[in-house]
Image (cartoon, rainbow, N blue to C red):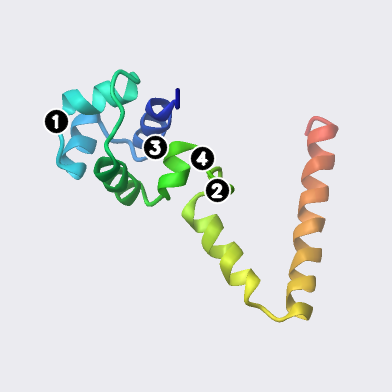
Amino acid sequence: MLDIGSKIMELRKRKAWSQGDLAKAVEASRDIIGKYERNENSPSVEMALKLARVFDISVDYLLGEGKHAAYDKDTLKRLEDIQVLDQDTRLILFNIIDTFLRDAKARKAYGQ
């Protein structure tokens, strides 16, 4: 079973919303939001779309399915923008990203 409830709760808390705030945003009851978060009920396709819109995420991200489900919309948009750059610009950008990633991994390895 998918753990949509935890994802909904996490996204709601990121916005500092109560269940009532989220319910109002998606035109649902607070009770149904609670049931979603406890995985007692799963949102319909229509409700999943509403939730994705208010959280500014993809439905894939909400469901935790699909090739890029772990990426938020901002990350996906950046990937799409990078993809249309010319090859030389992409290589420069990738070198910069690789440098930051290497440094972050080194800091993590040394416990910093």
Front residue (pair 16, 40): 40
Label 1, residues with CA under 10 Å away: few <14, some 14-19, many ≥20:
some
**Residues at marks 1 and 3, CA–CA distance in whole angstroms:** 17 Å
Of marks 4 and 2, which one's residue comes earlier in the chain?
4
Q: Quadrant of the N terminus?
A: top left
Mark positioned earlier in the residue sequence (3 or 4):
3
- Which residue type carries mark 1? Ser
Residue 8: x %, y % from top left: 37, 33
Dot 3: element: helix
Q: Are marks 3 and 4 in contact (CB under 8 Å)?
A: no
Q: Secondary structure at mark 1?
A: loop
The residue tagged 3 is: 11
- The answer to whether the residues at label 3 and label 2 have Cβ atoms under 8 Å apart is no
Determine which residue is flagged by label 1. Answer: 29
Q: Is residue 41 left or right of residue 7?
A: left
Q: Residue at x 25, y 41 (%)?
A: 47
In which image quadrant can residue 76 be found? bottom right
Residue found 77% across the figure and 54% down from its top: 100
Residue tagged 2? 71
Q: Is 37 left or right of 28, judged from the image as shown?
A: right
